[in-house]
Amino acid sequence: MSVFIPSVLSLAKESPQRLAEKLVRSGYVIEEHERYAKAMKKLLHAIYVQCNRTYRSINVLKKALDHQKKMSSSMSDKFQSELEQRMAQQRAEYEGTVKRHQTFIDQVQNC
């Protein structure tokens, strides 16, 4: 229902009985609007609560993602350093083997 707000001049022209009828009808409209306003207030509050929960969830997920990125980066760095160590050790072993073989070959040639 729409609310009609009459001007002061139009109210002055009305009879008291007619004004009373209008007030009674507008009272009903006001009650309807009050119920509608209460329902909208509840709905807005529910939406606010849901948005708050969503916002908090997003923040928790962002923190978890940042933590996971840091852990992944740390693990990657650790793996890379271990790989470099193993490669250096393997290279040293191969070079030692090559040196021993060269020494053996030199000994065989000199005999």
Image (cartoon, rainbow, N blue to C red):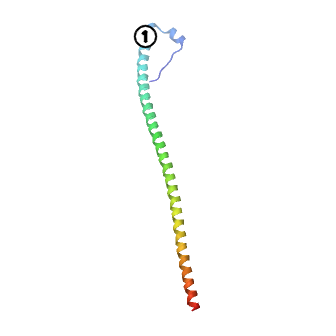
Nearest the eye: 95 or 55? 95
Labels in figure, total: 1
* Mark 1: secondary structure: helix
Residue 14: give x, y in percent of width and height.
48, 9
Name the image quarter holding the N terminus.
top left
Tell me if 22 is positioned left or right of 100 in this view. Answer: left
Residue 24: give x, y in percent of width and height.
41, 14
Name the residue carrying label 1. Answer: 20
Nearest the eye: 19 or 110? 110
Residue 48: give x, y in percent of width and height.
46, 33
Q: Which of the 4 image quarters holds residue 26?
A: top left
Nearest the eye: 107 or 73? 107
Name the image quarter holding the C terminus.
bottom right
- On screen, residue 58 above or below 101: above
Which residue is painted at 46% across and 7% down in the image?
Answer: 15
Which residue is painted at 56% across and 87% down in the image?
Answer: 105
Residue type at mark 1?
Ala
Residue 44: give x, y in percent of width and height.
45, 31
> Dot 1: few (<14), some (14–19), or many (≥20) neighbours within 10 Å?
few
- On screen, residue 3 above or below 87: above
- On screen, residue 103 above or below 87: below
- On screen, residue 59 above or below 68: above
